[in-house]
Amino acid sequence: MDYGVHLPLIAFDERPWTLKRLLDYTRTAERLGYSSLAVNDHLLFSRPWLDGPTALSSVLAATGQMDLMTTVALPVVRGPAALAKSLAAIDLLSGGRLIAGVGPGSSASDYAAVGVPFEERWKRLDETVGVLRALWREDGPTFEGEFYSTENIELEPRPLQQPGPPVWIGSWGSEAGLRRTARLGDGWLASAYNTTPGAFADARVRLEGHLRAAGNNPDRFPNAIATMFFHVTEDYDEADRVCRDVLAPMLRRPVRELRERLLVGPAEECARKLDAYRSAGVRRILMWPVQDEVGQLEAFRDQVVPLAHASLWEEPG
């Protein structure tokens, strides 16, 4: 299991976003040996949210050899052709390092903002995966669906990876979502605050069954847990404050549930949770610091990781 990081796109405090802030964060993550840099996607949210693909493109020069991930992008909300264009540029300019995680999102407000019926999100998502692949592939067949068509569309330049970047499907673990992931995806993205090690392990077993039924090898099907909000502190009152005052109102989850699921608290407690996820079959966890973002990247690397399967973490450099 390895560790990636989310770019800090959510306004948890009053600090302004600046390019320097994003670059400092990215350079720190790359220096500390994190595997990947991820961005999430919302138009509207309970807190101000910096645009994900734009933010990711702004720090490309500082990403070294990290994987670049969308976790997830919203092709139905953005429009699949427009998203295909943006992601192709990121893949091309990064030298072919993009993993395109996609999902429908869970915000009806995002759909209302672009005039797309929220109840159509699943059927449209299924089609958008086909649209993305058709637009990225050189000399491939066109896609024709109920909602979208790529006929007479030549979206150039195409991504460096051919026939296109791998497409991972976001699913919280429902049976329909896992079937969709096995049918359409090159990988699976789960959500940290919507799962537990036990729930992830159960969903992974069911996903493996769907993959085998589709003739795919589960051992070659990657996964990751995204949005692992974290705050390493030995002060239990501080941990409770972060969950109660910052995360619970934003995620609309009970404080006790968040304390159980997320990595908020002492380093040893966080390390035990990581080991539980590793035992459940998680291959990558994408960390998202809630406060003191650069300092927390260092705290996680220096205080938590040595306590959790330290031999799997390679020293950078």
Image (cartoon, rainbow, N blue to C red):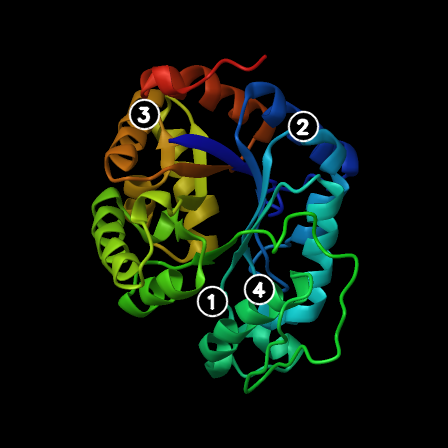
Q: Which residue is nearer to you in this view: 176 or 21?
A: 176
Q: Which residue is nearer to you in this view: 91 or 311?
A: 91
In primary-sequence order, the first of circles 4 and 3 is 4
Label 4 SS: loop
Which residue matches tag 3?
271
Which of the labelled discs sits on residue 159, or is there none? Answer: none
Which of the labelled discs sits on residue 74, or is there none? Answer: 4
Label 2 SS: loop
Q: Which amino acid does label 1 sit on?
A: Ser
Label 3 SS: helix
Q: Is residue 101 visible?
A: yes
Residue 4: % across, % down: 50, 34
**Callout 4 crowding tier (Cα within 10 Å): few <14, some 14–19, many ≥20:** many
In primary-sequence order, the first of circles 2 and 3 is 2
Q: Which amino acid does label 2 sit on?
A: Gly
Which residue matches tag 1?
106
Residue 296: % across, % down: 52, 26
Query: From the viewer's perspective, is the residue at label 4 or at label 3 nearer?
Result: 4
Quote the CA–CA distance across marks 4 and 1: 10 Å
In primary-sequence order, the first of circles 2 and 1 is 2
Q: What residue type is labelled 3?
A: Ala
Residue 86: % across, % down: 72, 57
Query: From the viewer's perspective, is the residue at label 2 or at label 3 nearer?
Result: 2
Quote the CA–CA distance across marks 4 and 3: 32 Å
Q: Quadrant of the N terminus?
A: top left
Query: From the viewer's perspective, is the residue at label 4 or at label 1 nearer?
Result: 4
Which residue matches tag 2?
64
Task: Please name the residue shown 28% across and 41% down the image.
Answer: 260
Relative to 26, is 40 on the left or the right?
Answer: left
Relative to 7, is 257 on the left or the right?
Answer: left
**Callout 1 crowding tier (Cα within 10 Å): few <14, some 14–19, many ≥20:** few
